[in-house]
Image (spheres, grey):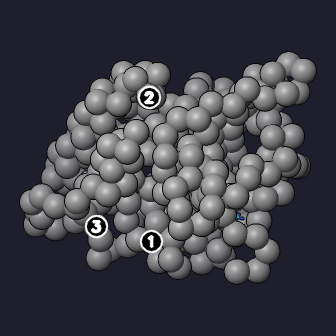
Amino acid sequence: MKALSNVLFLMIVGGIILSGATLSSGVEDTNWSVRRMGMLSSIEADVVRHKNVLGFARLTPGVRHALAKVPRHLFVPEKFRVRAYDNAPLPIGHQQTISQPTIVALMTELMAVTHGDTVLEVGTGSGYQAAILAEVVSHVHTIEIIPQLVDSARKVLADQLYHNITVHEGDGYAGLPDCAPFDAIIVTAAPPEIPQALLDQLKPGGRLVAPVGPVNATQWLKVWVKQQNGSCNIREIIPVRFVPMVSGGI
Ligand code: SAH
């Protein structure tokens, strides 16, 4: 288990820095797609290596397709663009980070989403995880507490023509009762405990994936599966390190 967290969270960012590729005439420079496939191979190697704790050995086709398609370099600040396809978290400003691609892949798999689902993401950040989900489900509601990140995520998602994502500004501790219930919920910042409001907004049979635990210490990635009688089965997956889920004015 320790090895896994080391691999996933203390990965040394290295490798070759290729010359900056640019977009021209709406056609993606092949450099980016080649590097994106490199990122995907790294994710798939992580999944195989840790199949016993994860409970699966390969990505489902929908998630794989999403990771191969979404241009992560457009979701990170320009100065980090050359590292966009390293399998590593990166700063996105406001002391927040875009999650490591392996973590995005695992959390998306653990949500067990399918075409036709409506999902909630708490912690929009860059908008990348929302875009990955939007490739698989029919609608993504995502909520972010930092107004500047709401604005930048709305812009990049609109530029990428994601019409099936709604970015809400607000405190995710309350969830989004007006849009509930959801087939699945993902929380991408760590609360000390899972907010009851989020469990309440899950459909029977729905899955909630979240890191839970103290600030600046190891948290656990867990999955809640809501039963028909409203109770939840809970599974602990791996130790992780996320930014804290804050409440109220930060
Ligand atoms: N999913 C993001 C990564 C987000 S990092 C991505 O793909 O880039 C976690 C995000 O959660 C940060 O943007 C942070 O501002 C946000 N956040 C923290 N507490 C929150 C809260 N109570 N409600 C909504 N968003 C919150």
Q: Name the residue under label 3.
A: 81
Mark 2 burial class by Cα count in 10 Å: few <14, some 14-19, many 20+ = some
Task: Tell me the residue at 45%/61% (across/down).
Answer: 98
Task: Tell me the residue at 46%/22% (across/down).
Answer: 55
Q: How far is disc 1 from disc 2 in space, using C-alphas?
A: 30 Å
Residue 72 position within the rendered picture, expressed as x and y whole percent measured from the top left:
36, 55
Which quadrant of the render holds ligand 1?
bottom right
From the Cβ of disc 1, is ligand 1 less than 8 Å away?
yes
Secondary structure beneath dot 3 equals helix
Image position of 91 (left or right of 196): left
Task: Tell me the residue at 49%/46% (across/down).
Answer: 239
Q: Specify the quadrant of the image occupied by residue 22.
A: bottom left
Check the image and report above or below for 126 versus 179: below
Check the image and report above or below for 1 versus 203: below
Q: Mark 2 points at which residue?
A: 53
Q: How far is disc 1 from disc 3 in space, using C-alphas?
A: 11 Å
Q: First in sequence: mark 1 or mark 2?
A: 2
Check the image and report above or below for 37 versus 64: below
Residue 114 position within the rendered picture, expressed as x and y whole percent measured from the top left:
59, 25
Closer mark to the observer between disc 1 and disc 2: 2
